[in-house]
């Protein structure tokens, strides 16, 4: 943690106060649990405060990584070039501490380790309860890879200009990465575009608003998948849970997944289940960070590609494109 509280209630911020000797001489407390903390000023980990005992603290983890500390420091310094921000801002009404609070209504949460969906939901909904927006910026362990898991899904955001998007932080390369126009193929593999924003270059708040700015429409290409029948058969033989569940729905209607031979669409926005759609079993995923109803987007998307050439590549556009069809 980078902040602590004097007995008087005054908050001290290590990123703004360099008088280390003075800090060492005073009793210091956690702004959340009010437990006593001490200054750690070693050579391996960035200067920070640590609890004498975490027994009664629900706000901080003593296992806060160097990555998490450093990223909070960098983002705070970047923001404070031209924006009002506070690091480790305590919100007593929801008993939560935001990693960085921007202009008193935007919480930036730097998440570098896995957490339960229950905990993610609690933190997200608490911010919404007090009318505060929250942006989750993900460290290395939570970067998107070739496939998306349930935790990744609930860190996703959505805009009509960028589709599904995801913010990542790279401590080593010192940059913020936007992955956007995220789509998933029939095998569950991801494709997306990337924009890289180096730390301390440009206004960070403007960068975080990029997905909502008017811009030239972009496109992403998905290559044709030729072995879907074999892929499905292999997964059914292995009794893969996802594919067995879908096969069960087909069986109830007297159908078989193995009978599907033609795939007019092979790449989809996240949350849309093509196999369920084929048998009129609509099943759209829900997303913690996305409040809007995406049904029209999915409908316009599938309507557009049903009319396209079924033999070649598939080009995908931002959601705003399909809304004009």
Image (cartoon, rainbow, N blue to C red):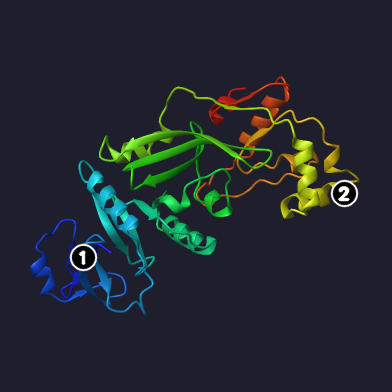
Q: To which quarter of the image does residue 300 belong? A: top right
| Element class at badge 2 | helix
**Above or below for 82 versus 98:** above
3D distance between C-alphas at marks 1 and 2: 63 Å
Q: Which residue is mark 2?
A: 251
Horizontally, residue 157 falls left or right of residue 46, namely: right
Q: Residue at x 81, y 41 (%)?
A: 279
Q: Which mark is residue 42?
A: 1
Q: Residue at x 56, y 27 (%)?
A: 317
| Element class at badge 1 | loop
The mark nearer the N terminus, 1 or 2, is 1
Whether residue 89 is visible to the viewer of this picture, yes or no, is yes
Instruction: Tell which of 68 and 252 is nearer to you.
Output: 68
Tell which tag, 1 or 2, sits nearer the viewer. 1
Horizontally, residue 221 falls left or right of residue 204, namely: right
Q: Residues within 10 Å of mark 2 (few under 14, many from 20)?
A: few
User: Which residue sits furthest right?
Assistant: 254
Whether residue 246 is visible to the viewer of this picture, yes or no, is no
């Amino acid at each position: 943690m980078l902040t602590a509280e004097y007995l008087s209630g005054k908050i001290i911020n290590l990123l703004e106060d360099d008088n280390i000797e003075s800090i060492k001489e005073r009793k210091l407390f956690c702004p959340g649990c009010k437990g006593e903390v001490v200054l750690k000023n070693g050579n391996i980990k960035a200067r920070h405060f640590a609890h004498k005992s975490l027994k009664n603290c629900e706000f901080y983890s003593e296992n806060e990584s160097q990555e998490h500390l450093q990223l909070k420091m960098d983002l705070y310094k970047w923001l404070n070039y031209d924006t009002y921000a506070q690091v480790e801002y305590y919100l007593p009404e929801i008993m939560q501490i935001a990693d960085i609070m921007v202009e008193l209504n935007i919480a930036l949460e730097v998440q570098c380790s896995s957490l339960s969906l229950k905990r993610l939901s609690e933190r997200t909904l608490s911010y919404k309860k007090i009318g505060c927006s929250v942006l989750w910026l993900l460290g290395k362990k939570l970067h998107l890879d070739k496939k998306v898991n349930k935790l990744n899904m609930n860190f996703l955001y959505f805009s009509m200009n960028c589709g599904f998007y995801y913010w990542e932080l790279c401590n080593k390369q010192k940059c913020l990465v936007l992955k956007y126009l995220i789509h998933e193929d029939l095998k569950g593999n991801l494709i997306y575009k990337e924009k890289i924003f180096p730390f301390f270059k440009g206004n960070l708040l403007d960068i975080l608003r990029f997905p909502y700015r008017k811009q030239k429409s972009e496109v992403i290409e998905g290559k044709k998948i030729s072995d879907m029948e074999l892929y499905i058969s292999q997964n059914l033989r292995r009794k893969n849970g996802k594919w067995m569940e879908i096969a069960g729905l087909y069986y109830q209607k007297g159908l078989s997944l193995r009978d599907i031979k033609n795939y007019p669409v092979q790449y989809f926005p996240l949350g849309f289940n093509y196999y369920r759609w084929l048998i009129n079993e609509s099943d759209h995923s829900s997303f913690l960070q996305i409040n809007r109803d995406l049904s029209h987007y999915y409908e316009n998307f599938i309507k557009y590609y049903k009319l396209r050439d079924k033999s070649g590549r598939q080009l995908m556009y931002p959601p705003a494109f399909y809304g004009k069809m």
